[in-house]
Amino acid sequence: MARIVFDLDGTLIDSAPDIHVIANQVLADEGAEPITLAQARDFIGNGAAVFVARMRAARGIGDHRQDHMLAQFTRRYDTATELTRPYPGVVAALERLIAAGHKLGICTNKPIRPTRIVLQATGLAGYFDVVYGGDSLPVHKPDPRPLDTALADLGEGPEIYVGDSEVDAETAQRALVPFILFTEGYRKTAPALIPHTAAFSNYDDLFGLINMLETEAA
Ligand SMILES: O=C(O)COP(=O)(O)O
Ligand SMILES: [Mg+2]
């Protein structure tokens, strides 16, 4: 049985619509124009501080507003769950993996508090034995340590990381862990340019893919 760690935003849940809303509330407080949903999606992946820095840059707002805007963004983040949904087939795939005896975890750059809240709100919390957020350790992805730690917490067995982005691919590479790319999330480049062991676009295919990788590794 494998230890399977998942990324969160753009992998298990489509959270960009909620993040878009709070981003524009923070920008409105600054007297700035809103960003688009596509921009919000593009800015996700390196954690909240980088998200805020990217949205500031998009609206020409200087560094001196970073700390204030990050604090406002963080304050709103806990309640940003209304529009967020698991991708189609996620729940069934997680049920199947657990029924087959796999151990599941999460390694995301989203801060741990909104991570836990959105996992509860979407009904996914119960599927994961370990959850690491972007501020759970002093370092975050693409540093391999959060992924390494999550895998170590899950015990024994083959390792797999499932994610949607360039950051996830780099993290897996640095941790020497096979990487499965979900192609329908928030990646910025073509799947062919993102190093991966396997890729999928439909959660109905994930169980078979993991079985195949386990058989190949055995
Ligand atoms: O950038 C974030 O805050 C979270 O993104 P991730 O769940 O894809 O790591
Ligand atoms: Mg992601």
Image: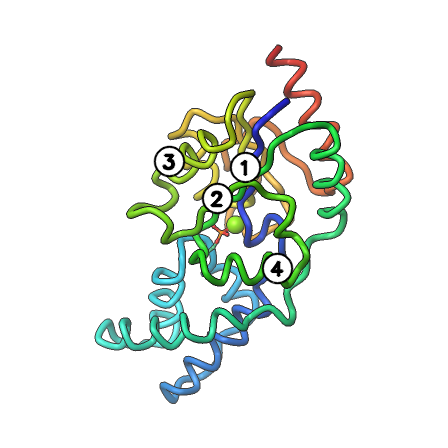
| Above or below 195: residue 8 | below
Q: Quadrant of the N terminus?
A: top right
- Residue named by callout 3: 144
Q: CA distance from mark 3 to mark 2?
A: 10 Å
| Above or below 104: residue 28 | below
- Residue named by callout 1: 5
Q: Secondary structure at mark 4?
A: helix
Mark 2 and mark 1 in contact? Answer it, CB < 8 Å: yes
Q: Secondary structure at mark 1?
A: strand
- Residue named by callout 2: 107
Which badge, 2 or 4, is on the more N-terminal residue?
Answer: 2
Mark 3 and mark 2 in contact? Answer it, CB < 8 Å: no
Residue type beneath disc 3:
Pro
Residue type beneath disc 4:
Gln
Please tell me whether mark 1 or mark 4 is closer to you in this view.
Answer: 4
- Residue named by callout 4: 120
Q: Is residue 45 left or right of residue 56?
A: right
Q: Is residue 189 left or right of residue 122?
A: left
Which badge, 4 or 3, is on the more N-terminal residue?
Answer: 4
Kindly identify which numbered label has been placed on residue 172. Answer: none
Q: Nearer the viewer, residue 165 or 207?
A: 207
Q: Position of residue 20 (x, y in %)?
A: 53, 71
Q: Secondary structure at mark 2?
A: strand
Mark 1 and mark 3 in contact? Answer it, CB < 8 Å: no
Mark 2 and mark 4 in contact? Answer it, CB < 8 Å: no
Residue 29 quadrant: bottom left
